[in-house]
Amino acid sequence: MAKDDELALPGDAEKKKREVSFTRLAVWVIAGGVGAYLVISGFIGVLAKG
């Protein structure tokens, strides 16, 4: 929704409906993989040390 003092541009509604880009999906997958690796390796480290 546009504010009262802003004019809605013709392409604004289409931007919200478009699919997720491949680059954004790749970044999320890589970041999720790195995060999962850190959590799993930390958990294994705690188990091995304890």
Image: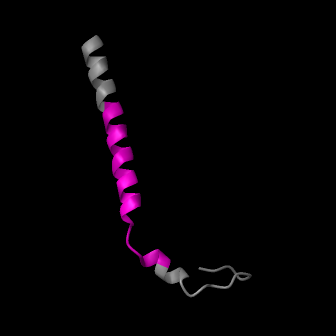
Q: Quadrant of residue 6?
A: bottom right
Q: Identify the residue at image location x=29%, y=12%.
A: 49
Picture coordinates of residue 10, whole percent (x, y): 56, 88
With respect to residue 14, does 37 lie above or below?
Answer: above
Q: Specify the quadrant that holds the C terminus.
A: top left
With respect to residue 42, does 22 lie above or below?
Answer: below
Q: Can you see residue 50?
A: no
Q: Quadrant of residue 3?
A: bottom right
Residue 12 drawn in magenta: no
Q: Identify the residue at image location x=26%, y=18%.
A: 47
Q: Identify the residue at image location x=62%, y=85%.
A: 8
Which scheme is used to colour this image of the protein?
Answer: one colour
**Does residue 47 appear to the left or right of 24 in the view shown?**
left
Q: Which residues are magenta?
A: 15-39
Q: Identify the residue at image location x=35%, y=47%.
A: 30
- What is the residue that sits farthest to the front in this orientation? 23
Q: Specify the quadrant that holds the N terminus.
A: bottom right
Picture coordinates of residue 33, whole percent (x, y): 32, 42
